[in-house]
Amino acid sequence: MTALLAITKVQLRIIRNDPWFLVIMFGMPLVVMPLFGKTMGLSLQASGFADATGAEQVVPGQVVLFGFFVGGSVGFTVFREHGWKTWDRLRASAAPSVALLGGFGLPWVVILLLWQSALFAAGSLVLGLSLNGGSPFALLLMLLGYALCVVSLILLMTATFRTVNQLSAFQNVGAMVFGGLGGALVPLDQLPGWAQTIAPITPAYWAMQGHTDVLLRQGGVVDVLPEFGVLAGVAIVISALAVGRFRVDETKEFFA
Amino acid sequence: MLRATGLEKSYGDVKALQGADLMVEAGQIVSLLGRNGAGKTTMLSIIAGLLAPDSGSVSIGSTDVLADPAAAAKLLGIAPQDTGIYPILTVRQNLEFFGELAGLGASRRPRAVEVADQLGLGSLLDRKASQLSGGEGRRLHTACALVHRPRLLMLDEPTVGADVATRLQLIEAVRELADDGAAVVYTTHYLPEVEALDADIVVIDEGQVKARGTQEQLIAEHKMRGVRFTIDGTLPAHLRESLGAVEVGDSAYRALGDLDMRSLLGRFGSDAEILRSVEELRPDLETVFLAVTGHRLDSEGSDVVAVSASEASES
């Protein structure tokens, strides 16, 4: 527990000392959102949501899409410890894998939660996004579920990959593929049939379904429990796999 | 304090350690001497719990490192060979983090200041580590290992790339720690540092401990004498071969072995008239290392075979 808390705190301190990554990752979706708002509004109206403005798709869509990039940072921070040659010092504390991974993962779950919330708030200001009777607690639950799922998935990939380039490729391509398949780019019913069939294998699908429940179907906490349950359940399973797969003595290659 | 016995470790077919032992008492500084690849870092990594040995045992005080690495981690501090600090954090933040990681509570804050002062970083506490000079960074790297007052401190070549001032400060800090009762294991290729630390010595080669003792004991036990001489012209081939002499300058040669001025003259015999000067070489740690391992220990730790090792005895 000591190591977990110490690592969590130092990760947050590092982010505080260099916040520009988060500033950029907050600004970019805000640039993208207005570009597709009108188109997404037409798409949602064609899908049967007559009063939709488009913000109900484009805001959660960009949050889900960019969330993969933001959450991907947890893997980068682990690899960076190898680049900074501090990994052995962490290991010398004899902290177990679960404490090490937890120490790196926990701050990014919190950051991802706050980052998503901030983007939703910004989306309401910029694009007039409204909960339309949906529960803010339900929305918060979905943000938490997605944060847990993304961070645990990236930690599993971190445990699996040997180089930061491999992780980076997965993060970049994964964001587009998972986001696209999951309905983050366009509403799910606009996708080809085969894509709709396999969409549930992606965390983005469950996140977008939950957001749709809240924003377009006036969903409450109970309504999004299935989606949250899937995301949280997958996060637990993947985290367990990550801890089992993680080898603290494996050399990871950061940028040369 | 530290008892590491029968350590064995192989990497594939390469035997990095072959039954190596290391004992260090509280307040004692032991310098681990060996060439690159001799097994020093492997030994330190095993003691620090970073590497599992194939066989052997390690204990710090009454704590079995292999059975209870978490408890052992509280007792030891290690500064690995590569500088490992957070460049984006300040000196203070680095020290406080490693103190907290080692289990220090609120005391990590005054302790960070204390350690920084000890290593000449007191005025740099709020400077980012990325803005430190190489020597300052090296000092911070070492300071992070001793912030929690470890009972066993292991420094793996702490002065590599460091300037003279940094070396002196590190040596002083290590001596103070030992005076306070810490056991210290210190690896280096710089033999003057070993002398400055007044450290006891363990010579490791090919994964085995070849010799151990105080500097005086080892010099007495492994006395390897030699001579440096200059001649007119070129050294005759039969003398070069019989003396194992190596040319080290313009008509200047060195030869190691049971040689002094008198015996050298005897070996030259009728050729003695070509001798211009003879200087007897003093036995020291370099000649000890050469005698024990058959290799010279140069400042980079590289492998220089015995025939050219006579250069080592000049210092």
Image (tube, coloured by chain):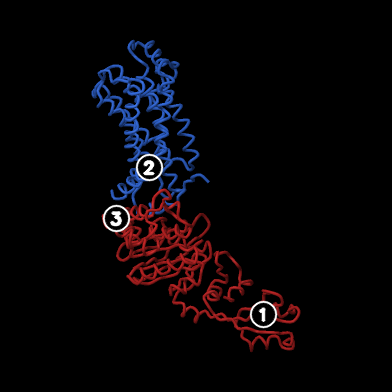
Q: How many marks?
A: 3
Q: CA distance from mark 3 to mark 2?
A: 23 Å
Residue B202 placement (x, y as % from top left): 46, 71
What amino acid type should be assigned to the residue bearing mark 3?
A: Gly
Question: Where is mark 1, residue-wise?
Answer: B243
Report the residue marked by disc 2.
A15
Label 3 resides on the chain identified as B
Which residue carries the number 3 mark?
B103
Q: Earlier in the sequence, mark 3 or mark 1?
A: 3
Whether residue A87 is visible here, answered yes or no, is: no
Q: Nearer the viewer, mark 3 or mark 1?
A: 3
Relative to A252, is B16 above or below?
below
Q: Identify the hue of chain B.
A: red
Q: Residue at x 48, y 57 (%)?
A: B134
Left or right position of B274 against A37:
right
Q: Can you tell which quarter of the image residue B180 is in?
A: bottom left
Instruction: Residue type at mark 2: give it.
Output: Ile
Secondary structure type for disc 3: loop
